[in-house]
Image: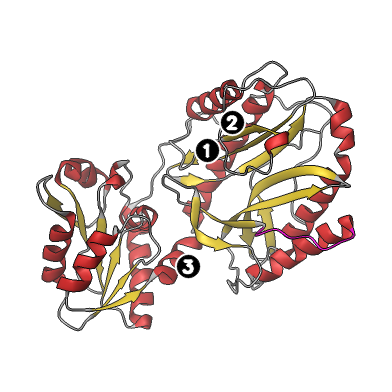
């Protein structure tokens, strides 16, 4: 059975699991060479001559670029043979040269349209009628740029989103080391947030405690802000903190992820400030945790995302005694850039044929919102191993 966090009788110590002297994150050049070789092998299998990579996560994966400048169009042109080319805003060139591995740089000034720079760079790498992959669902390929590329670059465009996400979603041993460090940082931040969540404390003060703990411990800027709210707004799933004070009978929901070298390990915990409220919602908590155990038991190589979701939902329905509807019970995580810590849109949901492989990591979630049992939610980051899964985040369940 996979490890799941225990349920202690008291609040966790905010200093528990605090990382000390974390090394600077990063990978040696051979790691990037291996990634590039693997992607090119997949390109050859799909008959692709060149990739236009625009998602920050995939650019980072292939060459190490790690900055906040992706609000300006940035792209990695990855040919089947030859040196990849990073097309970037010219002012970012010193950062890119300091960070990246074995790529050429094509900078454009603020007076040049990014589409013009991409057309020029593609003209040097892509021949007419070649098959060029692009990422149709990325947030960082503006429609105006895409329209110009389709009009002025005479190639056959092919969506390569699946190729890139599936390449990036299976982590190497070095990447798993980064994910373990991210998990320890997330645990540290969660312990601090739970300790700060007391009657009379404000939501923004809890968020401040979370940020202070994760950054002091050595964490990087995460891809998404922590979610801090009282449980009367539990179903407002992406609502961030306010200046509202917690009352003595409130429940506090925290969802967060620290980042280590852009690798994320999210988790969520729900803590009732009043033991009577905890007791009232305990049936939902027990159902949620039982479903989490079923989810993690199903999270193993060769299972599909749909099968994992089915195992989770069956456990919830056994506890509630009736059909239960929810959109998913988790999603791929790993490298993340704002505005998200998700590693693409591959979720554990009905109808998803994604086949799990050892080395994938998921943010696994177990929500039970039931009129009879109560309301409860928790989540962790779990690694698919060769024979099952390992839960990387270890924060105890508060109550």
Picture layout, residue 322 above or below residue 271: below
Give the structural element (helix, strand or loop) at label 2: helix
Q: Mark 3 sits on what residue?
A: 166
The answer to which image quadrant residue 277 occupies is top right
Crowd class of label 2 (few under 14; some 14 to 19; many from 20; radius 10 Å): many
Q: Are marks 2 and 1 in contact (CB under 8 Å)?
A: yes
Crowd class of label 3 (few under 14; some 14 to 19; many from 20; radius 10 Å): some
Q: Which residues are magenta?
A: 321-328
Residue 50 visible here: yes
* Image point (47%, 52%), residue name: 174
* Image point (65%, 20%), residue name: 245
Of residue 245 and residue 201, the one placed in the foreground of this image is: 245
Q: Earlier in the sequence, mark 3 or mark 2?
A: 3
Q: Mark 2 sits on what residue?
A: 189
Q: Earlier in the sequence, mark 2 or mark 1?
A: 2
CA gap, disc 1 to disc 3? 23 Å
Crowd class of label 1 (few under 14; some 14 to 19; many from 20; radius 10 Å): many
* Image point (23%, 61%), residue name: 145
Which label number is shown at residue 258? 1
CA gap, disc 3 to disc 2? 30 Å
The prevailing secondary structure element of the residues shown in magenta is loop
Return the x and y of residue 9 as percentages of the image width and height. 84, 29
* Image point (90%, 59%), residue name: 321
């Amino acid at each position: 059975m996979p490890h799941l966090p225990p349920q202690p009788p008291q609040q966790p110590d905010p200093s528990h699991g605090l990382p000390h002297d974390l090394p600077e994150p990063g990978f040696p050049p051979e790691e990037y060479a291996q990634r590039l070789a693997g992607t090119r092998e997949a390109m050859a299998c799909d008959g692709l001559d060149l990739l236009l990579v625009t998602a920050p996560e995939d650019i980072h994966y292939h060459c190490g670029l790690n900055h906040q400048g992706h609000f300006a169009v940035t792209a990695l042109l990855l040919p089947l043979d030859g040196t990849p080319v990073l097309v970037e805003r010219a002012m970012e060139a010193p950062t890119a040269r300091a960070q990246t591995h074995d790529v050429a740089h094509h900078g454009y000034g603020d007076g040049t349209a990014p589409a013009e720079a991409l057309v020029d760079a593609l003209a040097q790498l892509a021949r007419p009628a070649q098959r060029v992959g692009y990422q149709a669902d990325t947030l960082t390929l503006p429609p105006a740029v895409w329209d110009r590329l389709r009009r002025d670059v005479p190639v056959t465009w092919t969506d390569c989103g699946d190729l890139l996400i599936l390449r990036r979603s299976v982590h190497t041993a070095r990447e798993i080391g980064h994910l373990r460090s991210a998990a320890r940082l997330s645990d540290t931040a969660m312990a601090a947030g739970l300790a700060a969540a007391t009657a009379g404390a404000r939501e923004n003060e809890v968020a401040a405690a979370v940020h202070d703990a994760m950054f002091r411990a050595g964490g990087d800027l995460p891809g998404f802000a922590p979610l801090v709210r009282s449980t009367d707004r539990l179903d407002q799933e992406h609502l961030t903190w306010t200046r509202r004070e917690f009352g003595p009978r409130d429940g506090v929901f925290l969802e967060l992820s620290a980042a280590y070298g852009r690798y994320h390990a999210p988790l969520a915990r729900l803590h009732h400030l009043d033991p009577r409220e905890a007791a009232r919602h305990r049936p939902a908590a027990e159902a949620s945790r039982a479903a989490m155990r079923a989810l993690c038991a199903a999270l193993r190589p060769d299972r599909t995302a749909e099968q994992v979701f089915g195992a989770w939902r069956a456990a919830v329905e056994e506890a509630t005694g009736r059909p239960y509807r929810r959109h998913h019970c988790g999603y791929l995580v790993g490298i993340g850039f704002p505005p998200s810590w998700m590693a693409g849109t591959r979720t554990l949901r009905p109808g998803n044929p994604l086949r799990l492989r050892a080395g994938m990591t998921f943010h696994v979630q177990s929500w039970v919102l039931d009129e009879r049992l109560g309301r409860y939610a928790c989540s962790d980051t779990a690694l698919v191993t060769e024979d099952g899964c390992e839960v990387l985040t270890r924060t105890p369940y508060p109550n």
